[in-house]
Amino acid sequence: MNEYLTEDVIRVIYALIAGACLGFEREFHDKPAGFRTLTLICMGSAVFTIISHHYFLQDRVASNIVTGIGFLGAGVMLKEGLTIKGITTASTIWVTAAIGMTIGVGAYWLATVVLVLVLSTLVILNRFEKGLQDFSQKRTYEIIFKSQTHAVDELEKQLVQNEISFIRAQLRKVDNKIVARYRVKAGRKQHSKLSLLLAGSDLVEGFDV
């Protein structure tokens, strides 16, 4: 009994450390689920897995952990304008629970390998992604034009003159205002240039990104 207890305590402590490592990375980048959240998720998943091994049906508890983590992940995803944020953090919550469960069954090497791969993905690929965004990133702009009928054509001419690649995805009329949705593929500097152009344009009443 003492041997099992000691082994279980080691698993919980390792889950705490693994969750803290992932949580520190998220906290460092000021994400919604940070240090304490991921630590508790990893440790909790390990504890549920351990007690299911000793007292309950393992497959049923495991499936409930996955379901519960899905609700937590959905809670950190937010819609800001036309963009959904928090998907990476939700995915991190999901994989953190998986690491906790892996530790809970005593598969230390597998948990360690996954932990290293996840941290590498979050740190290294994040830098790589930011580098790519300097050259090309896709954004959706919803622009509210003033009542002039020529406003849409005039703005599109300005976009072409500024060498901004765009696709008009939607055009509609709302409360006597023309509303257009554009998909724009450009570098970070061009997106900044476009935002300034829209903000200073006499043709545009407002816009959302």
Image (cartoon, rainbow, N blue to C red):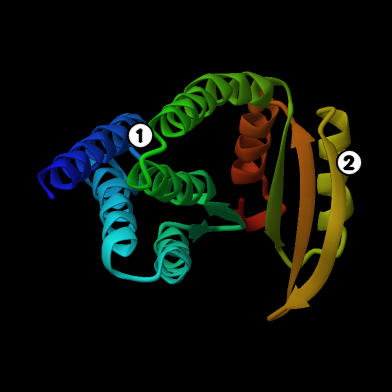
Q: Nearer the viewer, mark 2 or mark 1?
A: 1
Residue located at (43% from left, 30% from top): 115
Label drawn at residue 160: none
Q: Do the residues labelled 2 and 1 touch (CB within 8 Å)?
A: no
Q: Nearer the viewer, residue 28 or 96?
A: 96
**Residue identifier under label 1:** 22
Residue depicted at 42% across the width and 61% down the height: 69
Compared across the picture, whether 128 is left or right of 69 comes to right
Does residue 48 lie above or below 108 as drawn? below
Q: In which quarter of the image is residue 18?
A: top left
Task: Identify which residue, 108 or 76, lies in the foreground.
Answer: 108
Residue placed at 67% from the left, 50% from the top? 202
Q: Residues within 10 Å of mark 1 (few under 14, many from 20)?
A: many
Image position, residue 11 (x, y; %) = 25, 40
Residue 166 percent location from the top left of the image: 84, 42
Secondary element under disc 1, as helix, strand or loop, is helix
User: Is 39 in front, or is 206?
Assistant: 39
Up/down of 23 relative to 154, above or below: above
Q: Position of residue 76 (x, y in %)?
A: 41, 57
On the picture, is 80 further left or further right than 139? left
Q: Whole-Å distance between the Cαs marked 2 and 1?
A: 47 Å
The label number, if any, that marks residue 157 in the structure image? 2
Given residues 47 and 170, the one toward you in this image is: 47
- The amino acid type of the residue labelled 2 equals Lys
Q: Report the amino acid beneath label 1.
A: Leu
**Percent position of residue 184, x then y:** 77, 42
169 vs 186, left or right, is right
Sequence-first disc among 2 and 1: 1
Describe the element under mark 2 as helix, strand or loop: helix
